[in-house]
């Protein structure tokens, strides 16, 4: 009923939205593909998760992908998503997000045909919580290192593109006869290809002639 509605009062996020944000290296869920009104929310009795909640898949193979995202505003999530909201003043929002990235929920999923985790499974996972100022410092250092990693990734991607262009240029020059110094007596590549084709035709003709001789 509420699939694909682009406008509304409350964003409605799904596992796919978490994956999209994660693959874009964005830690926040901002724009939703689905929205509902407050009235519709009351009808379906959906729980509203607060901004700052870290959300993740709680059922299916998506659990093993270990992807997380933080709600940038009060939102609703579908039944395949679970959220953890940090205690204000005790736990930093980004700290719990990065901490959850280090925990492979697949290791805590129930041994059924379809992997799943419940609230009780999450509550049993021991997690360290240093003082809030230290949490902030840890987050700052993580984000500094991630920004360096992102810059390196961009450089690598650019280098790979340049390398591919260079390969294509080398191949083009090679078959245009521009890669090595040319002997004036050398035939152009077109003539060489003609000779190769003629030789191939001659060999095929000889094979056919030999076959006819044997049959006779």
Image (tube, grey):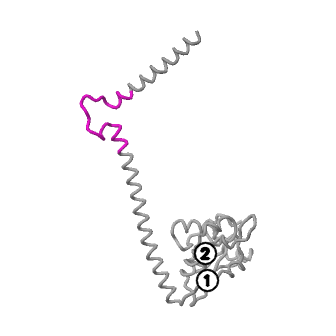
Q: Is residue 134 visible?
A: yes
Indicate whether residue 213 is drawn in magenta: no
Q: Which residue is mark 2?
A: 103
Q: Give the spatial CA distance, label 1 vs label 2.
A: 9 Å
Task: Determine crowd level at label 2: few under 14, some 14-19, many 20+ residues with C-alpha closer than 10 A.
Answer: few
Q: Is residue 6 visible?
A: no
What label does residue 127 carry, if any? 1
What label does residue 189 carry, if any? none
| Residue 178 at x, y percent in the picture | 29, 39
Determine whether the residue tagged by mark 1 lies in a helix, strand or loop.
loop
Asked whether the beta carbons under mark 1 and mark 2 sit within 8 Å of each other, the answer is yes
Determine whether the residue tagged by mark 2 lies in a helix, strand or loop.
loop
The image quarter in which residue 15 lies? bottom right
Q: Quadrant of the C terminus?
A: top right
Residue drawn 55% across the image and 77% down it: 98
Seen from the viewer's position, the closer of residues 98 and 89 is 98
| Residue 43 at x, y percent in the picture | 74, 75
Tell me if residue 24 comes above or below residue 74 in the rendering: above
Q: Quadrant of the N terminus?
A: bottom right
| Residue 48 at x, y percent in the picture | 67, 79
Magenta segment, which residues? 170-193
- Toward the front, the furthest residue is 214
């Amino acid at each position: 009923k509420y699939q694909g509605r682009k406008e509304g009062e409350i964003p409605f996020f799904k596992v796919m939205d978490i994956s999209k944000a994660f693959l874009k290296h964005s830690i926040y869920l901002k724009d939703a593909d689905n929205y509902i009104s407050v009235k519709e929310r009351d009808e379906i009795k959906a729980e509203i998760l607060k901004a700052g909640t870290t959300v993740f898949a709680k059922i299916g193979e998506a659990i093993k992908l270990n992807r997380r995202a933080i709600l940038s505003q009060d939102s609703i999530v579908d039944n395949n998503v679970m959220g953890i909201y940090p205690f204000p003043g005790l736990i930093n929002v980004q700290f719990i997000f990065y901490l959850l990235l280090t925990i492979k929920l697949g290791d805590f999923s129930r041994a059924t045909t379809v992997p799943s985790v419940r609230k009780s499974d999450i509550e049993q996972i021991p997690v360290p919580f240093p003082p809030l100022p230290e949490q902030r410092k840890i987050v700052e250092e993580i984000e500094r290192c991630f920004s360096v990693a992102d810059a390196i990734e961009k450089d690598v991607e650019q280098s790979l593109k340049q390398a591919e262009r260079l390969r294509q240029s080398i191949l083009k020059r090679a078959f245009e006869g521009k890669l090595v110094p040319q002997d004036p007596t050398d035939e152009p590549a077109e003539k060489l290809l003609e000779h190769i084709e003629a030789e191939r035709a001659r060999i095929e003709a000889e094979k056919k002639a030999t076959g006819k001789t044997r049959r006779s």
